[in-house]
Image (cartoon, rainbow, N blue to C red):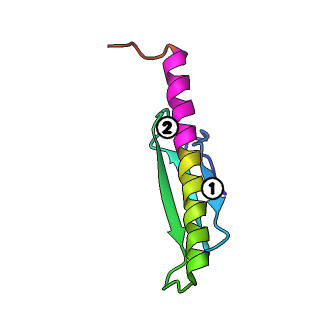
Amino acid sequence: MEQEDSEGRDTGLVVVGLEHANGSVYLEPVGYDEPLWQVGLELDDGDHIMPPYVLASLAAELVVAGNLCTFLQWKSLEWDRNSGRHETP
């Protein structure tokens, strides 16, 4: 999967493939040199009919992706604070 922007910079894109649905979760910074992260969810078109245990398993996968995104944002904020590139107001 392409992880560089049009200028050749690494965007920090992380893709988590879902095991209990046809699709992926994309984790990425809000913008280049931004410490905040966002999540995109891409599922195949159409309805998804599943038994409750599969839905619970899918929910668990999404929790893991959310926790990973939170961790990456925390690490980015920590790096940003320690970089000395921004003045504290």
Of 4 and 89, nearer the camera is 89
At a point 54% along the width and 17% down the height, the residue shown is 83
| Crowd band around label 2 with a 10 angstrom C-alpha radius: few (<14), some (14–19), many (20+) | few
User: Is residue 88 found left or right of 34 in the rendered image?
Assistant: left
Residue 82 lies in what quarter of the image?
A: top right
**Highlighted magenta segment, given as a residue range:** 70-83
Of 86 and 56, nearer the camera is 56
Q: Which residue is mark 1?
A: 15
Q: Secondary structure at mark 1?
A: strand
At a point 61% along the width and 46% down the height, the residue shown is 4
Nearer-N-terminus badge (1/2): 1
Q: Is residue 72 above or below residue 41?
A: above
Q: Is residue 45 above or below residue 27?
A: below
Q: Position of residue 34 (x, y in %)?
A: 46, 34
Q: Is residue 46 above or below residue 84?
A: below
Kindly tell me whether residue 71 is visible in this rendering.
yes
Tell me if residue 77 is in the magenta stretch.
Answer: yes
Q: Which residue is mark 2?
A: 32
Q: Main secondary structure of the magenta part?
A: helix
| Label of residue 28 in the image | none
Amino acid type of disc 2? Tyr
Kindly tell me whether residue 5 is visible in this rendering.
no
Q: Position of residue 76 (x, y in %)?
A: 54, 31
Tell me if residue 84 is in the magenta stretch.
Answer: no
Amino acid type of disc 1? Val
Cα–Cα gap, marks 1 and 2: 17 Å
Q: Nearer the viewer, mark 1 or mark 2?
A: 1
Count of picture labels: 2
Q: Position of residue 40 (x, y in %)?
A: 49, 58
